């Protein structure tokens, strides 16, 4: 049973526009959520995170929104750049565990 | 600096071979992790070391044997692997055992393992 779901396998966006990547989770014990970006043949790179006590965290072009009642989070990238093209993984962890539970990833393609 | 290095980048081995994967970090992190990632799948946790002691073993077969010789190094010894063990093996580290905030996990580039 998938605890972290990224239902869109791919997303295509034009350069300069907003990219919105979505993630849903089922485990109410999750209290920390992270987004990682992965290029082919490289390891995941940490992008941004959010604690369950917040509903928004912003870092430059990247903003993560958390809706606990809907068990949903999203990553907004504004403006999108061609270098943002990569696979984006949503991950979550629970207070009592250290395992990062990853979603299956969304491949973002930003065209110029 | 959030660099985790892994060697080798690629490894091809037969089912009777013994090989080792190496991971290194010099960020003063005291927790280190091994993950396995199959094609088109998310990374899955295998082992966690905290302060050089094995903290979590996610029911990994004994043909995978982790070792943490010191706080900067993490090895994964491989013996009698099966073709289905072919995958990208990722190492990660964090300040302490955890997953968020100060304990954010930083990943290395991975070792692409092929078992023939």
Image: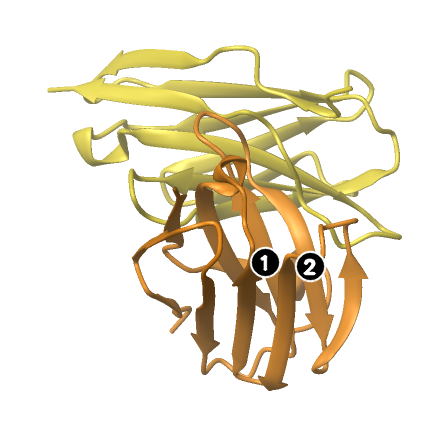
Please identify the residue farthest to the left as the structure is shown: A112
- What colour has chain B? orange
Q: CA distance from mark 1 to mark 2?
A: 5 Å
- Check residue B47 in the rendering and tell me which mark sits there, or answer none: 2
Please identify the residue farthest to the bottom as the structure is shown: B70
Name the residue at 70% across, 63% down. Answer: B48
Quarter holding the C terminus of chain A is: top left
Please identify the residue farthest to the front as the structure is shown: B16
Tell me whether the residue at label 1 lies in contact with that at label 2, contact meaning CB atoms closer than 8 angstroms: yes
Residue A14: image location, x then y, percent? 21, 14
Residue A16: image location, x then y, percent? 21, 22
Q: Which residue is mark 1?
A: B34
Whether residue B114 sits left or right of residue B30 in the image: it is left
Mark positioned earlier in the residue sequence (1 or 2)? 1
Number of residues whose C-alpha sits closer than 10 Å to that of mark 1, classed few (under 14), some (14–19) or many (20 or more): many
Q: In the rendered image of this protein, does residue A88 appear above or below residue A110?
A: below
Question: Which chain contains the residue that carries disc 1?
Answer: B
Whether residue A45 sits left or right of residue B52 in the image: it is left
Seen from the viewer's position, the closer of residues A9 and A77 is A9
Seen from the viewer's position, the closer of residues A65 and B100 is B100
Residue A94: image location, x then y, percent? 82, 45
Question: Which chain contains the residue that carries disc 2?
Answer: B
Residue A61 sits in quarter = top left
Whether residue B14 sits left or right of residue B95 in the image: it is left
Q: In the rendered image of this protein, does residue B40 appear above or below residue A49?
A: above
Number of residues whose C-alpha sits closer than 10 Å to that of mark 2, classed few (under 14), some (14–19) or many (20 or more): many
Residue A60 sits in quarter = top left
Name the residue at 62% across, 38% down. Answer: A91
Disc 1, SS? strand
Name the residue at 48% across, 21% down. Answer: A21
Residue B75: image location, x then y, percent? 53, 72
Chain letter, yellow: A
């Amino acid at each position: 049973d998938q605890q972290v779901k990224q239902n869109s396998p791919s997303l295509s966006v034009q350069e300069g526009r907003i990219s919105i990547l979505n993630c849903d989770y089922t485990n109410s014990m999750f209290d920390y959520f992270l987004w990682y970006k992965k290029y082919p043949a490289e390891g995941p790179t940490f992008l941004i995170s959010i604690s369950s006590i917040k509903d928004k965290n912003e870092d430059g072009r990247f903003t993560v929104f958390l809706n606990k009642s809907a068990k949903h989070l999203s990553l907004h990238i504004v403006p999108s750049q061609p270098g943002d093209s990569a696979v984006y993984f949503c991950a979550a962890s629970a207070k009592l565990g250290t395992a990062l539970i990853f979603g299956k990833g969304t491949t973002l393609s930003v065209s110029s | 600096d959030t660099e985790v290095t892994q060697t080798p980048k690629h490894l091809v081995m037969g089912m009777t071979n013994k090989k080792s994967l190496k991971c290194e970090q010099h960020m003063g992190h005291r927790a280190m992790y091994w993950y396995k990632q199959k094609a088109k799948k998310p990374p899955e946790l295998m082992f966690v070391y905290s302060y050089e002691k094995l903290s979590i073993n996610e029911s990994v077969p004994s043909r995978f044997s982790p070792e943490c010789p010191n706080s900067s190094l993490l090895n994964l010894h491989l013996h009698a692997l099966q073709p289905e063990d072919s995958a990208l093996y990722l190492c990660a580290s964090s300040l302490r055992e955890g997953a968020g905030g100060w304990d954010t996990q930083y990943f290395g580039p991975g070792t692409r393992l092929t078992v023939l």
